[in-house]
């Protein structure tokens, strides 16, 4: 048994042994579990891909005369102003004002909240336009100005749902193209898409949330952030395999970090034809090797992680619950799989190479003593399902379609 204090003491003296989740598999195979658990202090995990439930709080400071902003746009993208006078929240999936969306199907969705966040992290100028009804203490009624992230008092990324523990594989069984948040799905099962780093992904290496919890320090796009809550739609009671790894969507994390410390290459706006806009974010999470059991879970391989294949032309939008089959990430990463006797091309929405880069960057920070581990203040819920939204009238009677 090791403790967080013991591991951090080794990090501070430059003596910590750190492996990425990619490296640890062969390391344990060579050394044996018991010996490796004695030697290894930290395993770094990572992921990089679109995470729609992301956004940021921005504080502009006060103009002269002062203004209580009630409506605002940044680069023509609406932001939420229902907080304090000069605080706003910018959501990653918010469309630019006037975007035709899917009026002319499929829409291109060239610019939105995710792209504004990318520009802010990159230090580029963006335009603020704000309106107000005016008050005695905040008399200004209109403002237009240009700013960069360096002109803000705070720019804090606050993401309600990141790092899905596992996720669907999307396919299209219909005879028409289907445009989704997992990309274009061609007719008649010509292709499928998935979005996970598999054996590198944080919660797949800590499937029972033994070390990742509320208060855990994370590498968020290069900044040192933390888990501030369970993520929305956190559903730990999902189906799991014999190795305790979920075989469908399960746990999620709510993450926050200072945008001024982030690296532009790990914060990228995303345009999804026919669907909308999003934000690709890079996340790295260290797993302290407190016990041999924790180490064993970090040796999970792509071949041991199964994901459900779901028809996004019917079963996903209609919420039927039907699963066509399950595929391992080892199969998916070959780029070609067989479903119902048909050869199907497989593509990923997440970048394994970027995730591997993040895992190594985090490893280097820990080895230099620049990144200490934090013990969770509270464990993530382990016995919680996810409810759907019932459509009822004011008398609580179900509304039929």
Image (spheres, helix red, strand yellow):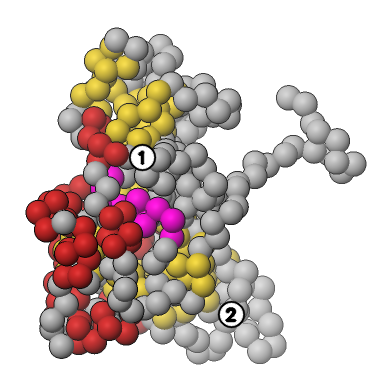
Observer-nearest of 109 and 121: 121
Q: Is residue 178 visible?
A: no
User: Quadrant of residue 363 in the image?
Assistant: bottom left
**Is residue 186 visible in this depiction of the protein?**
yes
Counting from the top left corner in percent of width and height, residue 257 is at 38, 73
Horizontal and vertical percent for residue 223? 29, 73
**Magenta span contains residue 131:** no
Disc 1 on helix, strand or loop? strand
In this figure, which residue is indicated by the disc labeled 2?
A: 85
- Name the residue rendered at 45%, 67% in the picture: 213
> Regarding mark 2 in the picture, which secondary structure is present there?
loop
Camera-side residue of 119 and 188:
188
Residue sticking out furthest to the right: 395
Q: What stretch of residues is rendered in magenta?
A: 198-209
| Badge nearest the viewer, 1 or 2 | 1
Quarter-of-image position of residue 39: bottom left
């Amino acid at each position: 048994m090791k403790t967080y204090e013991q591991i951090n003491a080794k990090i501070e003296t430059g003596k910590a042994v750190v492996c990425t989740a990619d490296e640890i598999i062969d390391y344990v195979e060579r050394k044996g579990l018991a010996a490796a658990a004695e030697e290894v202090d930290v395993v770094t995990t990572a992921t990089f891909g679109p995470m729609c439930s992301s956004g940021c709080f921005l504080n502009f400071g006060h103009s002269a005369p002062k203004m209580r902003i009630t409506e605002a746009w940044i680069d023509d993208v609406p932001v939420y102003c229902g907080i304090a006078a000069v605080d706003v929240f910018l959501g990653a999936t918010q469309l630019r004002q006037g975007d035709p969306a899917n009026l002319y199907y499929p829409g291109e969705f060239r610019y939105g909240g995710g792209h504004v966040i990318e520009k802010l992290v990159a230090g580029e100028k963006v335009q603020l336009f704000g309106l107000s009804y005016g008050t005695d203490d905040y008399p200004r009624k209109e403002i237009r100005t240009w700013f960069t992230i360096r002109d803000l008092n705070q720019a804090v990324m606050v993401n309600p749902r990141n790092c899905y523990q596992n996720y669907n594989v999307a396919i299209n069984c219909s005879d028409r193209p289907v445009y989704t948040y997992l990309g274009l799905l061609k007719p008649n099962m010509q292709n499928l898409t998935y979005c996970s780093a598999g054996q590198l992904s944080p919660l797949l290496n800590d499937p029972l949330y033994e070390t990742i919890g509320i208060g855990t320090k994370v590498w968020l796009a290069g900044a040192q952030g933390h888990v501030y809550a369970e993520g929305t739609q956190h559903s730990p009671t999902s189906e799991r395999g014999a190795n305790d790894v979920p075989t469908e969507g399960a746990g999620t994390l709510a993450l926050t970090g200072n945008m001024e410390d982030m690296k532009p290459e790990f914060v990228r706006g995303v345009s999804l034809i026919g669907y909308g806009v999003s934000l690709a974010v890079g996340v790295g999470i260290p797993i302290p090797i407190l016990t041999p059991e924790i180490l064993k879970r970090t040796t999970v391989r792509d071949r041991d992680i199964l994901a459900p294949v779901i028809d996004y032309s019917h079963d996903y939008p209609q919420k039927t619950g039907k699963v066509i089959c399950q595929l391992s990430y080892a199969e998916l990463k070959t780029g070609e799989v067989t479903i119902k006797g048909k050869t199907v091309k497989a593509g990923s929405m997440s970048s394994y190479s970027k995730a591997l880069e993040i895992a190594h960057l985090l490893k280097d920070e820990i080895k230099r003593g620049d990144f200490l581990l934090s013990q969770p203040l509270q464990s993530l819920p382990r016995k919680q399902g996810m409810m759907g939204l019932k459509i009822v009238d004011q008398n609580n009677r179900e509304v039929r379609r």
